[in-house]
Image (cartoon, rainbow, N blue to C red):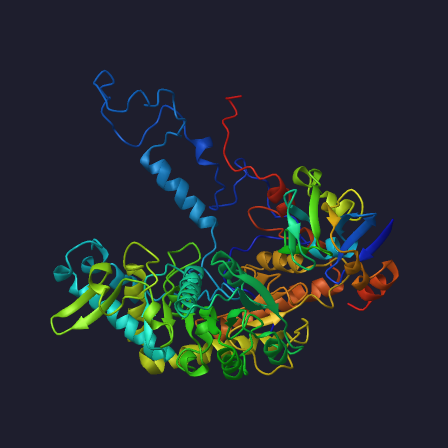
Amino acid sequence: MSRYFTEEHEWIDVEGDTATVGITDYAQEQLGDIVFVELPDVGTVVEQGGDAAVVESVKAASDVYAPISGEVTEANGALEDDPALVNTSPEEDGWFFKLTISDKSELEGLMNEKTYAVFVEGL
Amino acid sequence: MNAPNKSGWKPEMTADGETIGGPPTHTGNRALMLDEALIFEIGDRNTTGVDLPQPDLAAPNRLGGLERKADIGLPGLSEPETVRHYTRLSRQNYAIDLGLFPLGSCTMKHNPRLNEKVARLPGFADLHPMAPTSTTQGALGVIYELAEWLKTLTGMPAVAMSPKAGAHGELCGILAIRAALEARGDARKVVLCPESAHGTNPATAAFAGYEVEDIPATPEGRVDLAALEARLGPDIAAVMITNPNTCGLFERDFRKIADAVHAAGALVYCDGANFNAIVGRVRPGDLGVDAMHINLHKTFSTPHGGGGPGSGPVVFSEALAPFAPLPFVEKTADGYELVEEETAGEHHARSFGRMTAFHGQMGMFTRALTYMLSHGADGLKQVSEDAVLNANYILRSLEDVLFAPYADSGPCMHEALFGDKGFAEGMSTLDLAKGLIDEGFHPMTMYFPLVVHGAMLVEPTETESKAALDQFIGAMRSVASRAIAGDESLKTAPHYAPMRRLDETLAARKPVLAWADPGIV
């Protein structure tokens, strides 16, 4: 399994043709206390860089973009009851949705853990 | 610079700034400031303020068995109890009539009492919108005159008076743009909004069926013209820009932006929420705007912020005028005429429809026209000059203690923008805002625009005196230095408000939206 990152602070775990998407620890830190997460319906086809979910904190509501194109296969229902999971476990239990990848070559433009750390450092 | 806030109730403090002096009272109240319970908690089932006759329940009704049979659980209160309840609550409210209200982007200025007097004249206040126009000539005249003033002030040839507020006006403008594009058979799909746009802009575009894309800003806080030009193309329907923008800056390249947008076949929507800063000085029509809403409740002092309904007339360019919504008022040799569907056929056939059932917010029209006539053209010019002067006074008086990201971008317009850079670890904009409440000031707009970290947007408006601004600046400097020094007591502010710091996260995550009778399980 390999993990990639976007400049919009999403992470994506890739395992075969499926991927799991969430927002990074840096993103949750910037947003502050998360109070609501709107997840895509299963079956939604998302495009790389397109709107996929919405995350709302006490400060602001932000779009979460799809790191790559694909079809949503599962949404993390736990976030509906407990959106705070995004704060406490952003890169594990607080995942947003899973999808089947439609074009693996799209992964090439994403960052790995090291380059993302450097990217965040520069912000 | 360290002027105290002279108004306001002064609690007696001990040296630690925490406790209120004097022995605790039997009731828990503080002098004549009264705490107030929920109306359900003070009401009972044995009291009533109205002497209703016993209903004849045996008489036949036409409810078909759907009549309610159980107690509906409303609290019973006498009339004086009801009056006192709401009056006590109103004393806990904060309003523009009590003090400075520095909410950025909201233009919380004084509402002249002359406006109120005129709006209450029975010839305006008691009219029914369906009264025959022969009996409402005066009111139609007000709508017409106000429309003429708005067209003159904006340099635009047409105006729709009916939209009910800013976001409704945006929708009206974008629907006119869509109608114009559809009329030329041009199905464009994308609307561009700057990163610092009011949230209502992208929401409006999405509601009207468009995809929304961001336009980046330059480091100095203005629209990046080169990036915008690079994105323009046959799929762009419109560009929505706020001018002055939400960083408090005038978009100097607006004319170039509009020319580029028009050259690409798209249209320019201007969010006129900040018109207060340029009224009488700049005509949006000269900048190439195709549609712009005007918040009468901001620029022309019809009350808002819980104090009254908004009103958002939209001015249109020649290109969009044929598509403007109905109804509107025309002046004929016989007086004023209301142009509606039945009469629009010949000369306004391409109108996209209606935004509202009737003519618009009549109570706001009378207030706004009163404001314009009492100020005159010269007075309105001074309004924007004083608004800009006051904001710059705030910006330059605070930039040495608070991070001002665009301080070097030239003078600000009607609002001054600060960020939380320089605060001690763990201190936030929210903490500063709560500290400001202790100082007796309503906080500024927080965390907007999103392009500045921990944003604080201060709009003093033109109706504040230098003395009032000095008091506010003194309070801001004091609280800001506590945030920079990492004063832990700021984390638990407010200390002197009727309620201490509320758990906003819990309130948002697990809101309790309805009172439940503790006796009913």
Q: Quadrant of residue B177?
A: bottom left
The x, y position of residue B447, in whole percent, is 62, 61
Q: Nearer the viewer, residue B356 or A16?
A: A16
B375 w.r.t. A112: above or below: below
In this orientation, which residue lies closer to the viewer: B409 or B134?
A: B134
Q: Where is residue B443 in the image (x, y as percent from the top left)?
A: 56, 60
Residue at the outermost top position? B58
Residue A117 is left or right of residue B118, and the answer is right
Residue drawn at x 48%, y 43% as measured from the top left: B34
Can residue B241 be seen by looking at this rendering?
yes
Q: Pinpoint residue A106: horizontal percent, then vertical percent.
A: 77, 60
Q: In which quarter of the image is the N terminus of chain B?
A: bottom right
In the image, residue B15 sits, relative to residue B149, either above or below, namely above
| The quarter of the displayed image where residue B127 is located | bottom left
Q: Does residue B475 show up?
A: no
Please state if A48 lies on the left or on the right of B63 as rendered.
right
Q: Position of residue A71 (x, y in %)?
A: 69, 48
For residue B437, side relative to residue B100 (left or right): right
The number of callouts visible is: 0
Residue plotted at (75% across, 44% down): A94
Left or right placement of residue B478 versus residue B185 in this view: right
Instruction: Residue at 59%, 56% (x, y): give it.
Output: B438
